[in-house]
Amino acid sequence: MVRRNAGGPALTHGLDTGFLVATEVSCHADHGAARTLANSLRQNGDRFALAPQTLAEFIHIVADPRRFSTPLTVPQALERAQVWWNASDVDRVWPDESSVSWFFAAMTKHQLGRKRVLDTLLAGTFHRANITSLLTLNPTDFAVFGEFRCVPLAAPTAQT
């Protein structure tokens, strides 16, 4: 669990797609742990940061019948994405010139390939928004950057 100084300010946690998928798809192996963590953070007064690219990837994944035996329909996926996007405890963050410059520099510096493009642009978006705490099922995807703390699930079991 994330700790802060007594009476300190709430934290804002960037939402990665895998965590969002686990939170919303009941048959996901990490569904219970992801929901428990999200609820606990909410009770602490913490906030979440969500980027549009995460929403697009979320819809793509949860509506994919190759990934889930009973995927959401696209309208269901859109509805769930809108609930998160419009939640009062969610801050919307956007890629801009600075985040795209950070993305190019990080891709080059760390010699990342095509499978790291989406996560690196997301990291750049969070970096620009001064978000350093991430909710992800894939902390190694962000470890290379050396500036994010990934909040662990109680009992991680699978990756998305």
Image (cartoon, helix red, strand yellow):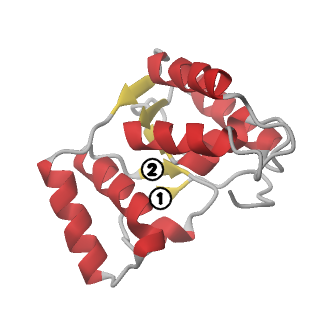
Q: Which residue in the protein does label 1 denote?
A: 149
Residue type for callout 2: Ser
Instruction: From this view, report whether residue 106 is shown above or below residue 51.
Output: below
**Residue at the spot x=70%, y=37% of the render?**
23
Q: Position of residue 16 (x, y in %)?
A: 52, 48
Q: Nearer the viewer, residue 100 or 59?
A: 59
Q: Where residue 82 appears, x then y in whole percent?
A: 51, 20
Q: Are marks 2 and 1 in contact (CB under 8 Å)?
A: yes
Residue under the point 76% across and 58% down: 156
Label 1: element kind: strand
Disc 2 on helix, strand or loop? strand
The residue identified by callout 2 is 133
Residue 130 position in % (x across, y down): 27, 46
Q: Residue sitting at 39 percent across and 65 percent down?
A: 117
Q: Is residue 101 above or below residue 2?
A: below
How many numbered discs, if any? 2
Three-letter code for the amino acid on which mark 1 is drawn: Arg
